[in-house]
Image (tube, rainbow, N blue to C red):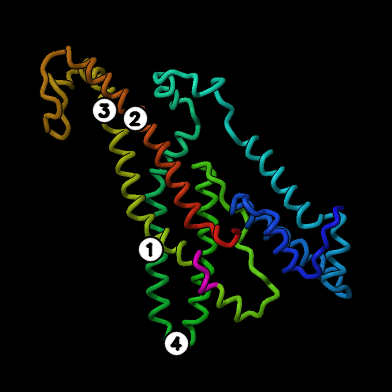
Amino acid sequence: MNATVLPTTIPDYLEQLRRSLAGADPALVQDALYDAEEYLRSELSEHPGKSEAEVIAAVASSYGAPDEVADIYRDTEVKVQSALRTPPARPAVANRSWFSRFFGVIAEPRTYAALFYMLLALATGIFYFTWVVTGISLSGGLAVLIIGIPFVILYFGSVRVLSLVEGRIVEVMLGERMPRRPLYSTRGKPLLERIKELFTDPRTWATQLYFLLMLPLGIAYFTVAVTGLATSLGLIAAPVAALFGGFNGGLWVDEIHVIGVDGWWALPLCLIAGVVLLFATLHLARAVGHLHGQLAKHMLVKSAQYE
């Protein structure tokens, strides 16, 4: 145990923990704050005769002081991320040729996860958009009634739950570290003040904006992924189609002469173009996955809280 003075209240403990985790991933900070609050309040409820200061002093030897807990979370995060990271197939990417880097994307599992996310984004985008538009519309319509107040509270609470769900999808498929625990909130505050924070929390509104953006993004992702895959696979399949008389001197799509060339010499060109387009689509999926992960991290995680 170091010489750092232990806090005497749970909010002070959480604040010290937050400061000790300064510079860490915001998602990690959110998880650490939630876990610490859960543990401290469960200990406090099991010892009703003790004050918060006495409980904190008692559990400091087992759970740890704020700076010790921060170090544990940092070390654990490094180990977990190292274990989950796919081992590189080559010693160093920088030493690989452009040819190897371009075609090596097909052997990376994250590529297919990002591609699947682009296809899934249309369905999730429709659901999120419908949920937010319906929730806001009903909240505004029911605001004049007594039932409107609990409905609005439930709706804003559901937004936080959906934020966690989307975060898990983003982390699993896109590899971006997202919160695994709900947003930390001081439970010692009065109920009305906690409800007020629910409505004034910028992340609540940023999450709803993210859900609204998911519809146009989902349409764009789905269109790009399907078009890229269908066109590239169609070009690759052209030589096979020619064997069964399906090439007809060129490439036709819905009775439209896409490639106006005649003769069998065009088949290798179609095959090469299809392969290049396929791998370009996979690289694009990786890029979209990375950029969308950054967007989700920025809008779904309340990073300003941890600065």
Task: Verify whether residue 110 appears in magenta.
Answer: no
Residue that appears at 39% across and 51% down: 123
Mark carried by residue 145: 4
Residue that appears at 76% across and 54% down: 67
Residue that appears at 42% across and 71% down: 135
Task: Say which residue label 1 marks.
Answer: 130
Name the chief secondary structure element in magenta: helix
In the image, taking residue 60 as reference, residue 103 lies left or right, namely left
Identify the secondary structure beneath mark 3: helix
Distance from disc 1 to disc 3, alpha carbons, whole Å, reads: 34 Å
Task: Say which residue label 3 marks.
Answer: 234
Tell whether label 1 touches label 4 (CB within 8 Å): no
Viewport quadrant of the C terminus: bottom right
Which x, y percent locates residue 81?
63, 39
Q: Amino acid at mark 1?
A: Thr
The disc, 4 or 2, on the residue closer to the chain's N-terminal end is 4
